Image: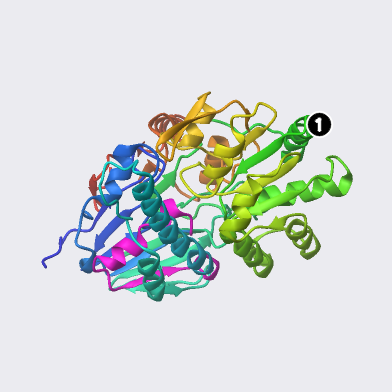
């Protein structure tokens, strides 16, 4: 198949929305995909996961992965099943986390398709998963790892480096040299004072910058996470309630357990039962023990956060939790209530006003988490409406993403401005607000690309 001879970058996802991170680089006879994520949230976005990939997967030479979260990695099994035969290159911790996240994603999709068929709430007579557990496990054979801050060849005339991004174990910024033109992808940037992860490295020089904008229109409140969490826990426990915390299994669950462990150790909250109901989060917590160089939590505190909770692995144990009464704390995936065991806990506990649902991070538009954050008094789950009378609390201090000021502080450390900055991975208002600030405060050229837009690397502006 003839390839585009010009050097170009095409925005196949994360343009005008937070999820579906996918950028296609065509240069020097190579096709390189930076990230391969799932679209999440609104149905018209999720439908893109089912559409044919914009280029034949077998024509892609390499995938470079910034990190393991599914909106960056979750389409890899489908890409491989549909013909991709190259390598998925990432850091070692990202590879380990993908070995948990991708099979779990395939398993959940199969499980949800079976449940929808059994309960009859799908519009399809025989609903099919996007991909299966078997597809996900097969895709892991394509993963290859590289060390941080070590240049490696991607293809003819293209070299790459992974640089620490904070945010999550293994999370990387990606710097690419394409025949003398430097492209820099921020990935998801962590925070400079994150309680768990080390801060991102400063922006290096780049001709073209592609930067996330998840929190591009806001600032995180300057409140300590423990100070925000403690009064909520005390309040709900005092009335005998159940606290359900939807949390991303990788990153957020570990951060929440760390804060609860610290609060309990100081006696700031009562020692009620805590359950971590996510096999993947349990395994991910073990990985945090093995990568101490990427976070600043001591071995002792890692052990403490692991020991405070009863680990729930089996489906039977999970179902048994729904028969218990409070006070207790349940931490379970998924963080935006898009699926997983946490939905069954909402079904069991969401209708009781004594209970509470603690939202612990960004909630993409169109997700159940965003609906709750917006004040919804019911959620559509498993084909019917579930009333929500439980107290809903949006925790503001647990985000793993840099806010607008922190992104700009990261940018201004570069020795020279990029020729062009593309603002991606944000809802429209967030992306455009950050674009305007970059232009106004730095005088840099910046714009928000359109979905499927292709830009010429020689004329990026």
Q: Residues within 10 Å of mark 1 (few under 14, many from 20)?
A: few
Q: Position of residue 310 (x, y in %)?
A: 72, 56
Q: In the image shown, does 410 or 337 lie closer to the viewer?
A: 337
Q: Nearer the viewer, residue 311 or 75?
A: 311
Is residue 435 at all visible to an observer of this figure?
yes
Q: Quadrant of residue 165?
A: bottom right
What residue sits 57% from the left and 54% below the top?
249
Q: Nearer the viewer, residue 91 or 118?
A: 118
Q: Can residue 448 be seen in this snapshot?
A: no
Residue 109 inside the magenta-drawn segment: no
Q: Which residue is mark 1?
A: 238
Seen in the image, is 70 located left or right of residue 45? right
Q: Nearer the viewer, residue 88 or 419?
A: 88
Image quadrant holding the C terminus, namely top left
In the drawing, does residue 238 fall left or right of residue 146? right
**Residue in the picture at 69% in, 33% down:** 222
Q: Residue at x 85, y 40 (%)?
A: 268
Q: Identify the magenta region.
A: 68-94
Tell me the element at label 1: helix
Q: Would you place residue 110 above or below residue 41 in this image?
A: below
Q: Whole-percent x and y of residue 333?
A: 55, 49
Q: Is residue 84 magenta?
A: yes
Numbered disc total: 1
> Image point 37% across, 74% down: which residue?
142
Check the image and name the residue furthest to the right: 267
Outermost residue, left direction? 2
Q: Position of residue 368 (x, y in %)?
A: 47, 35
Quarter assignment of residue 62: bottom left
8 w.r.t. 412: above or below: below
* Quarter in which the N terminus is drawn: bottom left
């Amino acid at each position: 198949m003839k390839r585009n001879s010009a050097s170009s970058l095409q925005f196949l996802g994360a343009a005008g929305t937070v999820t579906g991170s996918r950028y296609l680089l065509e240069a020097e006879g190579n096709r390189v995909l930076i990230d391969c994520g799932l679209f999440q949230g609104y149905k018209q976005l999720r439908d893109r996961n089912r559409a044919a990939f914009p280029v034949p997967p077998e024509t892609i030479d390499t995938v470079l992965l910034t990190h393991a979260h599914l909106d960056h990695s979750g389409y890899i099994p489908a890409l491989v099943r549909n013909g991709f035969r190259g390598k998925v290159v990432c850091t070692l911790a990202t590879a380990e986390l993908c070995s948990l996240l991708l099979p779990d994603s395939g398993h959940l999709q199969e499980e949800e398709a079976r449940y929808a068929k059994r309960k009859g709430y799908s519009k399809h007579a025989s609903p099919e998963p996007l991909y299966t557990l078997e597809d996900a496990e097969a895709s892991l054979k394509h993963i290859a790892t590289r060390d941080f801050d070590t240049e490696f060849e991607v293809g003819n005339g293209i070299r790459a480096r992974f640089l620490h991004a904070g945010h999550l174990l293994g999370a990387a910024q990606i710097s690419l040299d394409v025949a003398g033109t430097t492209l820099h992808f921020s990935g998801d940037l962590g925070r400079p004072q994150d309680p768990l992860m080390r801060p991102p490295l400063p922006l290096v020089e780049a001709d073209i910058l592609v930067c996330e904008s998840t929190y591009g229109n806001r600032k995180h409140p300057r409140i300590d996470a423990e100070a925000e969490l403690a009064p909520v826990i005390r309040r709900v426990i005092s009335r005998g309630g159940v606290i359900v915390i939807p949390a991303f299994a990788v990153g957020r669950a570990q951060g929440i357990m760390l804060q609860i462990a610290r609060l309990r150790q100081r006696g700031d909250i009562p020692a009620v039962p805590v359950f971590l109901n996510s096999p993947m989060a349990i395994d991910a917590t073990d990985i945090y023990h093995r990568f101490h160089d990427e976070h600043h939590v001591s071995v002792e505190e890692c052990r403490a956060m692991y020991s405070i909770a009863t680990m729930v692995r089996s489906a039977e144990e999970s179902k048994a939790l729904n028969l218990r009464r409070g006070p207790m704390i349940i931490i379970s995936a998924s963080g935006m209530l898009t699926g997983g065991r946490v939905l069954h806990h909402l079904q069991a506990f969401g209708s009781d006003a004594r209970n509470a649902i603690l939202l612990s991070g960004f909630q993409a538009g169109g997700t159940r988490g965003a609906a709750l954050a917006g004040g919804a008094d019911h959620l559509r789950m498993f084909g019917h409406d579930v009333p929500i009378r439980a107290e809903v609390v949006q925790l503001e201090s647990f985000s793993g993403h840099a806010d607008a000021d922190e992104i700009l502080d990261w940018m201004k450390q570069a020795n020279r401005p990029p020729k062009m900055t593309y603002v991606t991975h944000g809802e429209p208002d967030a992306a455009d607000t950050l674009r305007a600030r970059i232009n106004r405060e730095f005088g840099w050229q910046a714009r928000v690309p359109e979905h499927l837009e292709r830009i010429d690397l020689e004329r990026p502006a």
